[in-house]
Image (spheres, rainbow, N blue to C red):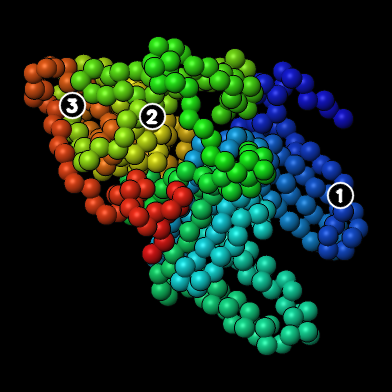
Amino acid sequence: MSVISEENVRGESVFKDIGADEEWEPTAIESLCMNCHQNGTTRLLLTKIPFFKEIIVSSFSCPHCSWSNTEIQSAGRIQDQGICYTLTVKSKQDLNREVVKADSATTRIPELDFEIPAFTQKGALSTVEGLLDRAVAGLEQDQPARRATDPEVAEKIEEFIQRLRKLKEVENDFTLVIEDPSGNSFVENPVAPQKDEALTVSRFKRTVQQDIQLGIRADDDLEEEPDGNDLETMRNEVLVFDTNCPECNAPASTNMKLVQIPHFKEVVIMATNCDGCGHRTNEVKSGGATEEQGTRITLQITDPSDMTRDLLKSETCSVIIPELQFELGMAALGGKFTTLEGLLKDIKDLTVSKNPFICGDSGTTDRVQKLNEFGEKMDKVIAGEMKVHVILDDPAGNSYLQNVYAPDPDPELTVEKYTRSFEQNEDLGLNDMKTEGYEVEN
């Protein structure tokens, strides 16, 4: 039996990257079959997928009754915010979208008034069609017993099962909602790097009850967290608190400081450095309140020196490059204080270099080619060889792009103020219909 040493936990030998060249085998464990109650075999694979961090894939098979089962569990950290995916299924192609559903996720189909509560199913790496099949299998499991004890209820459930099966024909559009307070679920965007019109991604702040469900708050701790240190102290000091590395989960330290950006406002910068794997992150949050109006900042890139402009992208800011038909939603990349070059490199990494669905069996030739072409165009933009417009659209008004001519006007930079829509106020939690950080479902 192998021993997991501290070096292995902190290094790269426990969770392996998925790749065709790997020769290592999963761990096999003899375990009890829940179908025939004889011994079968469970195989465990500890691996690492971009976007999803570390995961544990388990596969059980029984040689006696041929029953099998596959599950996926997140082995990484719980994210800072919960995430909600709302997918409008319009065609059979949408049924093939790959989905990572954590066991803490709630799955809903509003048109059928159907819901699978959190922690009632194990996590799964599947497709939209696979989720429907799994729901049907769960409802069918106890049907023989229901027909014997309560035929009327069994008949109603059978009718509902047929309605679920009919969804796979996609005769009418339907909506699939996956809401995960851990932030570790994912729904594929098959047209990346373009915006997916059928898929809406939003993040929300967890409630105290959800923190308790996830095990990150004590059961008897029903009070909200108190405010942090004195504001004046935070302005003059770098605060340090313990955390875990988002990559290898080793203990690390996060530094936090309030910084005043010239000609803008005060922001909170948080940086984490991991001594175990060398991973570094930086995140920026606005130190002020939501502005009365949204802000749309447009920069026309005319010279390679534009890449050195300081840039603040808040968590609520979308990034649009019209010439590349590209739009990055407000939930992606989080808040960042960097340069324009740094932001463009992060966008390329997110959509191309670290995209899990362009490698292996998941990557179709057309999709891989499209994303590689997008990566080449991004390289040209960064090198100053392609003239494009970069638009920062922030309904909270908390994003910033440096004016290199300040205090004089910048001929290539336009800043517009606009009135937020009702939907944007909903996303920012400013409408009365929003409660405790949840999205309002229509």
Residue located at (34% from left, 18% from top): 259
Q: Nearer the viewer, residue 212 or 201?
A: 212
In this rendering, position of residue 409 left or right of residue 397: left
Image quadrant holding the N terminus, namely top right
Residue type pointed to by label 3: Ile
Q: Is residue 354 left or right of residue 208?
A: left
Picture disc at residue 31: 1
Residue linked to disc 2 = 285
Which label belongs to residue 301?
A: 3
Q: Residue furthest top?
A: 236
Q: Is residue 5 above or below residue 378?
A: above
Q: Foreground: 346 or 396?
A: 396
Indicate the amino acid at tag 1: Ser
State the SS at label 1.
strand
Q: Residues within 10 Å of mark 1 (few under 14, many from 20)?
A: some
Q: Position of residue 122 (x, y in %)?
A: 67, 53
* Residue 43 in sight here: yes
